[in-house]
Image (spheres, rainbow, N blue to C red):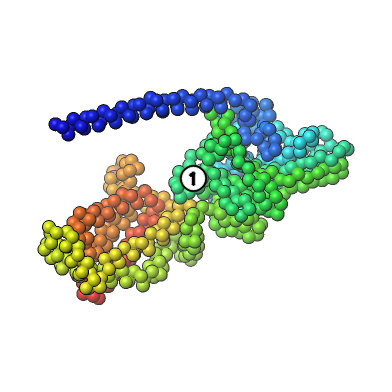
Amino acid sequence: MGDQKNLVIAIALSLAILLGFQFFYELPKMRDQGAQQQATQADVSRPVAPAAPGSTSAPGTTASGLTQQLLGPTDRIGAIAASPRVPLDTPSLRGSIALKGGRLDDVVLKGYRETTQPNAPNIVLLSPAASPDPYYADWGWVPAAGAEVKVPDGEALWTADKGRLTPESPVTLTWENGQGFAFQRRFAVDDRYMVTVTQRVLRTAAGEPVTLHPYELVTRSNTPVVLGYYILHEGAYGVFDGKLKELTYSDMKEAKTGVIEVPSTGGWIGFTDKYWMVAAIPDQKTGFKARFAHALTGKTDKYQVDILGSGQPLAQGQTIESVSRIFVGAKEVSTLETYQEQLGIVRFDLAIDWGWFYFLTRPIFFVLHWIAQQLGNFGVAILVLTVLVKLLFFPLANKSYVAMSKMKALQPEMMKLRERFENDKQRMNQELMALYKREKVNPAAGCLPIIVQIPVFFALYKVLFVTIEMRHAPFYGWIKDLSAADPTTIFNLFGLIPWQPPELMMIGVWPLIMGVTMWFQQKLNPQPADPIQARMFMILPVIFTVMLASFPAGLVIYWAWNNVLSMAQQWAIMYRMGVKAT
């Protein structure tokens, strides 16, 4: 009765603490946050998009431009049709450049689809400002303080010298401000994902020299859906003075001023998804000021990364020029490294999140990619890579399996000691240690193969997860995408029952194969002396089966195949030493 009374009192006190915390702390905190959010939404002085470098309003956004964004087309097709355009067509990209605003705001990736189905829609990367999810690149000039020069904005209607932009046919857009200044934007594309933009300003008007700063920006509205894995960066990032800087969308929101500025010479800045990237790349030999910016308009979050170049004086009869690039496409390792080498883009390879173990992930990727090129299948390449890893660590694993075989042979002696000193745990442990020492057996040696596997396992997981080369890479049978989980499940008899179980119950064929091989491998190992510990080890295959069911199929195939090879090696050693496998 006394224990029950104490239990009731403890529960009552806990409830009182929880309710008091909610009433006196959480409720006032929620009220304050609500008031701050209303104040932010009511702040009409904030721009509809983050401000352009060095200016006080969004580039290309005037009062009428804002009205068009709010009242204009609501779908992507209608938004594209609202402006005259120059079509973009390359072996890798299709889309268009809007003549109204001179923006690159319509890009679709020809080589990638949303799913593995052959008729699935292609990946849409950029969309106009009036579409549901605006995502576009823009360029322009910012006059220095005190200079009164009308520069092109989002309402400026440009004229094109050609009707189509292709790798063989660059396009030049022209716009005049009526004050003796002619602005040009020349777009040139290659056969992959790089667009080179050359901005020029020609001045015929008389007057004092004016200074103009070139800028390039990428704007993205609405917070995109992110996977949220700790091993993958999604958001804004860039390289500045050779160092990588990463900001999540939450980081950009939490910046006190909404703006983070980073000066640099050489580098780039952009937005990344898991497989796709849009990055602004300035001249690599001149200094610039990069910026991460965020603004809230109503309930819409707007994110922007931009680059502001050094000011250039412009007098009558002179021309100033600025050359920059923008990468719009898939983060293919070979493509990024080619751009880094040929264009001199500083650490462009860091666009792929290789992680802290890059010294493992990069070599594993290149070996895996080379094998796949030779054999024509990434799944088979994973099997071959597993064999190579086993050969690399063969001497270490061999010593471990020899030690484990000796432990297996000592099981009868260990059982006798356990029965003899059943009521004296301390004495039993002393006798076991003496037995290990006498027989020259290290009980911890069996952990070495697992310890060796962990870095390789994690590095392969990283490669499968972040590299686009693994995306939609098929194996054999039902595995159509090695970077995705096994799509089958035991709970609908692997598709025989027309029922789609919840994600938690998706335990496919390969996870089951992995679990079974893990169970058989444990049978070859010596059992722990502690019965409770032995039972815990026996349920590990079940735990790993459930845990790895949602992992990429390529990783599960690696683990299962590694188990098979380990069992074969261990059985051969046990046979040679005359130790029974059961």
Kind of residue indicated by mark 1: Glu
Query: Which quarter of the picture shows residue 318?
Result: top right
Kindly tell me whether residue 491 is visible in this rendering: yes
According to the image, label 1 marks what residue? 114
* Residue at the image position 62 percent from the left and 51 percent from the top: 240
**Number of on-image labels:** 1
Task: Give the camera-side residue of 339 and 493.
Answer: 339
Tell me: residue 572, above or below residue 188: below
Q: Is residue 86 visible?
A: no
Q: Where, quadrant-wise, is the N terminus in this rendering?
A: top left
**Residue drawn at (63%, 45%), measured in percent from left and top?**
262
User: x%, y% of residue 69?
Assistant: 62, 29
Task: Return the residue nearer the eye: 317 or 34.
Answer: 34
Note whether 462 is above or below 150 in the view shown. Answer: below
The picture places residue 431, in percent across and down from the top left corner, at 18, 66
On the image, which quarter does residue 521 sit in? bottom left
Q: Residue at x 86, y 38 (%)?
A: 208
Q: Seen from this angle, which residue lies furthest right?
A: 206
In-image side of 418 versus 331 (left or right): left
Left or right, 514 with respect to 157, comes to left
Residue 327 in percent (x, y) is at: 62, 49
- From the viewer's perspective, tell me whether residue 388 is left or right of residue 580: right
Helix, strand or loop at label 1? It is loop
Along the line of sight, the residue nearer the viewer: 259 or 326:
259
* Residue drawn at 41 percent across, 68 percent down: 388
Q: Residues within 10 Å of mark 1 (few under 14, many from 20)?
A: few
